Image (spheres, rainbow, N blue to C red):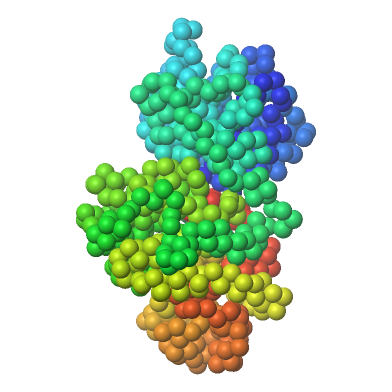
Amino acid sequence: MCGIVAAITNGLDARASVLHGLKTLEYRGYDSAGMAVHTGDSKLAVRRKMGKIANLEAELASNALPESDQVIAHTRWATHGAPADRNAHPHTDDGGEIVVVHNGIIENYLDLRAELVADGHVFLSDTDTEVLANLIARHMRNGNGGIDLHTAVRTALTEVHGAYALVAMCATEPGTLVVARQDSPLIVGVGDAAHYAASDMPALLHLTRDFVALENGESAILHADKMQLCSASGDWIERETTLCDWTPEQAEKGGYPHFMLKEIEEQPDVLARTAFDRFHDTEGDVVFEDTFTLTDADLRALRRIRFMAMGTSSHSAMIGRWLLAEFAELPGETLNASEFLYSPILPENDTLTVIVSQSGETADSLRAMRELQKRGGRILGICNVQGSTLAREADDLILTHCGPEVGVASTKAFFGQVTALYLLAIRVGRARGVLSTERGLELLHDLRTLRPKLDSLFAPEAMAAVRQAAAFLATVPSCLFLGRGLQHPIALEGALKLKEISYIHAEGYPAGEMKHGPIALIDEHFPVVVLATPDRTYEKMISNIEEVRARSGKVIAVGVAGDQQVQNAADYFLPVPEVPPYLAPLVNVIPLQQLSYEVALALGRDIDQPRNLAKSVTVE
Ligand code: M6R
């Protein structure tokens, strides 16, 4: 939540490249945006505008900032203070000497603000960030000229409770940016005679692919030609850069009208990239990279597996729990990460916890991970972002290879997570002796042959069917999604996608629940989306369809192409290819993603940046 970009170069004007990076980060928040530059004559200049980055661009076109080789910028997801020009970042202290961009929440900002006001400081915004700027300025002034920006930032941060990633710049200290982080993400990009900082790597891919991730409590001084990294305890430390394997093109729309559509269509490639190189084609097993250190003995010793995640990732976690039970005979549970802290459940020594997160920066999931680690629990992260906090702090890691996901609605990341969970189930099943080599080989074969089958989901007939159903769905205020067994998480995911980007109320239910309450909603105007592909729940799903029809409800059914029974019973039929039942989630989720996309398109919604949301939820 909130996106930060900053650059310091050796004389090169950095305004355009910072703005480009900021646009790439707009998925992190779009309530307001702003930019500040050092003007080179011991002055700072700031422009800020409520609303999307386009508004800031318009402001910069009519009221340009001077050229500068020291630029910081921010796109905001409002926490403290309503979206407004005056609450937009960057924020300066009341003397205009310090300027700060910040992502996070300063929990004790009201107390600090009261102290600063008593000291004579004047505030112009309702934000916690303006408190930071003034706090830093106060320390610099109190230093009788002896305190530099980095020392002042570190001192100010000792008074702060909460989460932050920040970049600070000082009018009287040209050639320096100071960055710091605690519980909010921040990475430093190392360029050719330039250093950069950002909340996420995609913002800097057009400038560099060499990154250093800051750990909690660390800070750094950035100059054009060097970076000085400071540990939480104040020691200067060295850290190698990590090469990011994402390309700048992956973070661009590439001719698509929306990132979401591009990302939906990338899913067959995600399957290949996440799975195929990990197949052990003679052993019927899976080989993970050395970030996965769980040995066969460790896996055999497990008695339980716990999955934790938020949002879409929690739906893949539900599928993971099912797969581990099915293929590795390992019982488990799925918990909402934000609820875990209130749950009485304690980790047992023989329990593995899997945390699933696209970004690896979701505050609720990270908090749950750290709490469990404190209690001695072992964490396996499943994550899409190399170098993210989850990727660095989990005890073991499986990276999904989806490439950057930019659309706020998660699509290909879900697909990559479920793919990784299939691999995990095979690995654990093989290690525990539950799966034979032959069965392992069959499962790998099923995954490999899934890819060409996915093509039919993007064929013109399939898309026409989706658009027809979408035209109807766009006219209703509310609907239900029903699925049983492995399709229940897909029903939840379909409902989440629809409400998230179209703002139509949607609920996902286990289909068996329908008769226990939701059925009261059904009348001739009410649509029910059912997942009715062949598996052991098929007959019961057919009964559910009939129960909806008996009450004149409208049925949108996902069924196997050519299944006349489902097709005839449905008002709208979304055909999918036939696959082994355990792979159906990967197939059935796609028409539901397409359906939400088409509904949102028909309603003229802001598909990639739906209202009130941010891609990466870095506050609890
Ligand atoms: O980055 P994460 O996977 O941890 O994010 C979790 C949720 O915030 C995320 O999946 C959210 O629900 C999606 N925007 C839904 O499309």
- Up the image or down, 445 lies above or below 243; here it is below
Residue 543 horizontal side relative to residue 167, left or right: left
Residue 19, quarter of the rendered image: top right
Q: In the displayed orientation, state which residue is furthest to the front.
A: 282
- Up the image or down, 135 lies above or below 597; here it is above
Q: Is residue 15 visible?
A: yes
Residue 85, quarter of the rendered image: top right
Residue 325 image point, x, y percent: 33, 70
Q: Nearer the viewer, residue 452 or 320?
A: 452
Residue 332 image point, x, y percent: 30, 65
- Up the image or down, 492 lies above or below 562; here it is above
Residue 574 horizontal side relative to residue 438, left or right: right
Q: In the displayed orientation, state which residue is furthest to the right.
A: 62
Q: Nearer the viewer, residue 505 or 212?
A: 212
Residue 382 horizontal side relative to residue 274, left or right: left
Q: Residue at x 42, y 78 (%)?
A: 484
Residue 407, quarter of the rendered image: bottom right
Q: Residue at x 60, y 74 (%)?
A: 453
Q: Is residue 416 visible?
A: no
